[in-house]
Amino acid sequence: MAAEGRVVGIDLGTTNSLVAYMEGDKPVVIPGVDGSNLVPSVVALDPMPKDGNGRPTVTVGNSARRTLVETPERVIYSVKRLMGRGLEEVQSELKFFPFRLADDVEAGEVPRIQLGEMRFTPPEISAYILRQLKRNAERFFGSPVTQAVITVPAYFNDAQRQATKDAGRMAGLEVLRLVNEPTAAALAYGLDRNKEGLIAVYDFGGGTFDISILKLSDGIFEVQSTNGDTHLGGDDIDNLLLAIALDEIHSEHGIDLRQHPGAVQALRKSAIDAKIRLSSEPVAQFDVELPNGDRYQREIPREVFEQLIEPVLNRTAGPCKQALADAGVTPEQIDEVVLVGGSTRIPAVRKLVENLFHLAARGKKPHIELNPDEVVALGAAVQADILAGASATTEEMLLLDVTPLSLGIEALGGTVAKIIQRNSTIPASATEHFTTGVDGQTNVAIHVVQGERELAADCRSLARFDLKGIPPMSAGLPRIEVKFLIDADGILQVSAREQRSGQQSQIEVKPTYGLTDEQVESMILDSFDNAEADFAKRLLIEARNEADSILTKVEQAQSNPAWSQLRGEEIAAIESTRNHLSAARSGDDLNAIREATIALDKSTHRLAELMMDAAVTSAIRGKTMGEAGEQLNEDLTAPHPMAPAEFR
Amino acid sequence: MLKVIDSAIPVECWSCAVAHNESTLFCPHCSKIQPPPGGDYFSVFSLVPRLDLDLGMLEHQFHKLSRKLHPDRYARASENEKDWSLADTALLNDAYRTLRDPIRRTEYLLKLRGAEIGEEHAGKDRKDPSRVPADLLEEAFDLNMQLEEMRMSKKIGDTDPELQSGLEQAKKKYNDMLDGVDSDLRAQWQVWDDGEEGARKESEKKMVALLDRRRYISNLVRDVTETLAT
């Protein structure tokens, strides 16, 4: 069954995730149950069941985002920034996010995030997002989906790639390939034209920045070089705006909103709205009511905004120049530049790109024909089609990607001996020989690192392993051949052999960061998920759950002040669609339930907006002074965006 | 040295059981992918070892083989075929990366022929005196003094225009020297490609010396460039 099923392409993004497939000769995004192509990469834990038994349900996407203001401690977003990272890195990352680490996390473990009363590793959180996308696709096709291509930032290291693959497995997906996001975008652009030449893909997303330079010839997409920053994206811009608002509210009105996670989330949404508006308008406003009745009103003209974000944007220039140098080309030799990622909608970003690649002088414009939010998923669908084979559209296409970082081994004195250079076409391999330093030694320890620095301590530690079972010989006599191979996903595989005795040495590769196979196995979500017999039943159960969830939310909303702001006909429409759904929900007609769910979702659209707008105020007013005081002492919560304004 | 995976010759095709004598990526009989063959990087491209290569042809061949070998083509094949596709493609990529670069290609061929080549990545000290070309010893010493002086003055925010222009001249001079080494190397390529065994041996010695010289000079150029840039 599964082996010859459809292969979908998934863009697992920092801010939004999408799933797409090839419909004939065109890649198409599969919409979710609410009709939207984008599934916000937000995961929320519903309240614990009232009887105290069982596990709370996990929701993903728009419905999870809605709970961000009311129960911020049960919601996580931007989890991609935490994927494949060690404890210290996660701690420094969390300075900018309202999540907190589980308090029993130990060094060397994959960090777990506390969400309500439960704890999850970043791959588990990502697995919930992937499972949602998988379900959206299954709902769309009416049949199970078990194989996928997932995109990752080109500059993701080995651990981040492995974590993404683990997440796929937990979600019940066989990950046929990890594809680099900029390369996927190039595939989407290169599909309908027989382009030849050099193209640069500038991918500035929610949390990561990538630049890739590709040579297109005769259907072969050959990456020449890639560079980037896995710590740079639209999030950084949001945080800057948020910092200003928080600081000004504090100094002008004497209110420290940072003590109110819900209010900060609502303000963060205003900051994002302002950022988006500034891409098309010359000015945007913050206008927020504060608890003491004051209003925080602030105009942000585009020039001010552009000055503010200039340092962030300039950080993309270095990687671009390095990528050009590594590819051995000048900006003038780049024939086309493709823009990818939501942040490339900012006019200042486009101007920067035009300057970097000397486009204006050559009468060229960067390519923006494909929706920058969707292009990566579309490209993933193209790659999925290539892998599935047997498609006339893609049979001549082939993607040759590179490894973004050099692979090295720690040598004497802590220096790094590079064995595979960055920008080598993958799969790539290197064979090294090791020997013993002491008579009778039976183990040799090897430390593998990734990065460009000269000292191992400055590079990213990938794995340490022991070559075991070396036959006892005089020092220097054993000759152990170790083969390092970076596969087509950009993930390292190691094998070893003692040559004098012909023995296969045992190796146990302990990844420095990451989950063991057993851990991944134990984290697989609903293992029954793939059983075909249960499929129809499952769809029905899911549809009912979705119906219940929205019905409950509408029920609760009636006591929200926003309800009284609705017009009479709006309330009537909600009542009618709600009764309709209640009736459909008790039946067995899957489509009737789904349609009624969508209808209710649509009729409550304005209600949801009103609730969001009112949120800053209510999130603050809802708390007693006592609660606020308690929160002050709750240091476990990482300080929220821009804690002490790091704003220069 | 190049890794040669043990493959008894003749080998039987795993799929059609017809024996094939040469190391090969695909069975000549049934065209199925085979485990990584022994043999050198040149043989991956069905070439005999030589130094003057037509890079256009090499790229064309690389693309053609990639289309047939790449793991993307075996995503739904048997586990064995998947493994071989991965290993064969890694071999192809390693071979192409080595052969398309003139210096790596020369070093590789010399190593195949048993020559000792100082490799940059092997962590050999680039200031290893035994590797310093005799005629450059004195000049290099002076240059290093100048570089040190430059770094010191830059550290205290001083710029000495005389020192600056001296270093820029040195950079140009060594770059010209590199061009000279490269054209000498190319001349040796011809000697090796066209020569008999005796002539080849002679030319190999010259190329080893030229590569040492080249490595030394390009390190000097790099040091000067870095110092001027900081």
Image: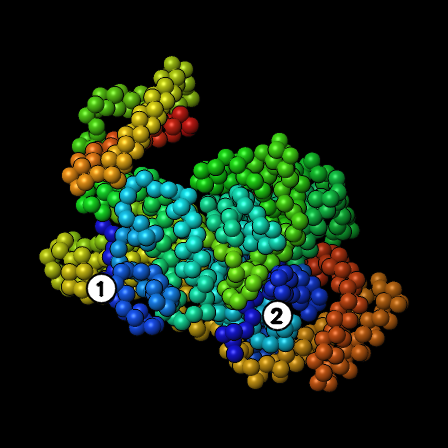
Q: Is residue A68 above or below residue A329?
A: below
The amino acid sitting under disc 2 is Ala
Q: Is residue A308 visible?
A: no
* Residue identified by numbered label 1: B9
Q: Residues within 10 Å of mark 2 (few under 14, many from 20)?
A: many
Task: Indicate the chain on which mark 1 is placed.
Answer: B
SS at mark 1?
loop
Q: How many discs appear?
A: 2
The chain letter for the residue carrying disc 2 is A
Q: Is residue A568 left or right of residue B184?
A: right
- Residue at the right extreme, as displayed: A568
Q: Residue at point 23% right, 65% down?
A: B10
Secondary structure under tag 2 reads helix
Which residue is tagged 2?
A137
- Res A598 → quadrant: bottom right
Residue A317 lies, in percent from the top left, at: 53, 38
In this view, the mark in front (1 or 2): 1
Answer whether residue A563 is visible to the viewer in this image: yes
How was this image coloured? rainbow
* Residue nearest the viewer, comparing A408 with A296: A408
- Residue A482, x across and y down, in percent: 26, 57
Compared with residue A512, is residue B165 higher up or lower down, i.e. above or below? above
Mark 1 → mark 2, Cα distance in angstroms: 50 Å
- Quick check: A139 left or right of B203? right
Q: Is residue A559 left or right of residue A240?
A: right
Q: Position of residue A285 (x, y in %)?
A: 75, 45
